[in-house]
Image (spheres, rainbow, N blue to C red):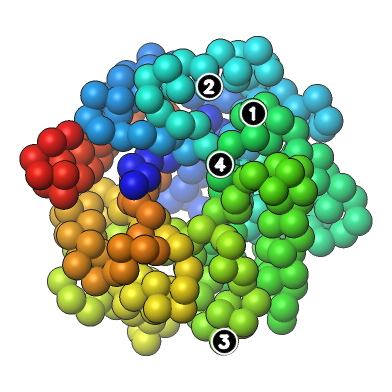
Amino acid sequence: MIYANLLHLSYNMWGDWENPAVKGTYWAAKPYLRFDEKLWNDLLVAMSKRGFNMVVIDVGDGIEFSSRPEIAVKNAWSHDKLRSELKKCREMGLEPIPKLNFSTCHDQWLGVYARMVSTPTYYDVCRDLIGETIELFDRPRFFHLGMDEEEAVHQANFEYACMRQHGLWSRDLAFFCKVVEEKGQGKVRPWMWGDYVWNHKESFYRDVSKNILQSNWYRDPVRGDAKSVYGGVFNDSIECVRTFEEVDKAGYDQVPTVSNWETPENIYQTIRWCREKLSKERLKGFFLTPWRPTVEETRDRHMDAIERFALAIGELRGGKT
């Protein structure tokens, strides 16, 4: 079973919004790396001690890509630094998995290329970045491609909004997966956020390969059927929790996502619910996502999430963490 946690090297997933509720906060993208190494080390130690066996690293513009040096922000990690940290993770029993989010909602890290989506130049850049990342991570078992929240509602405060629709999202996803499989020589499996299915069931189940590991997510307490985190603003009819079951029955392997974003109760309740409802064959583990940058001001949220996740998986293991 996978017991993973998402940690951000880069947190440049949004633009420098003009929305006064966001501008000036850590949500807004910056041209320099925002990363506290002491917190990173403390989180790795806590994860190692508390039963985690995988760390998914959101790389973004946080490393110096040889193929595309213009991507990196100031103080981005060198290849040697990254490899040293990956070695440390492995020695602590934490399998490092890379993540590059290619959703148009979360691709500010791509810089100028975020405004070239689905062009020949864009495809060349993404191919280079995926290939180099796979090489740096020594051909990892998985590669997380993001691809979440690609809906107009999520970009309402963006100065520049862009989204794929009418089949382009599915075709670009297929392109990314093909690159992952080719660059990984058939040994690297694509992984993605699974929320696109909420509003695009027909095309999702028709076009999304069963080879892609799914991580549907839900952030409120799980008490039977539950409505979308977006409520009436997005779509009242969406039942995110029920999606876990639908994806399972459709034959996809999945690693359900849990978080202390809205409420810490989500972590235990989602894990328990999924263990009761999903098939053992297709439930591959659980994925913790605090959704916070790796900076000191978020320490308490990170540590709280790790502890609650550990307690939940410890119960599943018969009290052992």
Which label sits in the foreground, 2 or 1?
A: 1
Say which element carries label 1: loop
Callout 2 touching callout 4 (CB < 8 Å): no
Instruction: Decide which of tag 2 and tag 1 comes sooner along the chain.
Output: 2
The residue labelled by disc 1 is 138
Callout 2 touching callout 1 (CB < 8 Å): yes
Q: How far apart are marks 4 and 3 (CA)?
A: 29 Å
Which label sits in the foreground, 4 or 3?
A: 4
Q: Can you see residue 219?
A: yes
Q: What residue type is labelled 1?
A: Asp
Answer few, some or many: residues within 10 Å of disc 1's Cα (few below 14, many 20 plus, some between 14 and 19).
Answer: some
Q: Is residue 276 left or right of residue 22?
A: left
Which label sits in the foreground, 2 or 4?
A: 4
Say which element carries label 4: loop
The residue labelled by disc 3 is 202
Residue name at image x 17 percent, y 53 percent: 268
The residue labelled by disc 2 is 86
The residue labelled by disc 4 is 141
Q: Which amino acid does label 2 sit on?
A: Leu
Question: 249 or 235: which is nearer to us?
Answer: 249
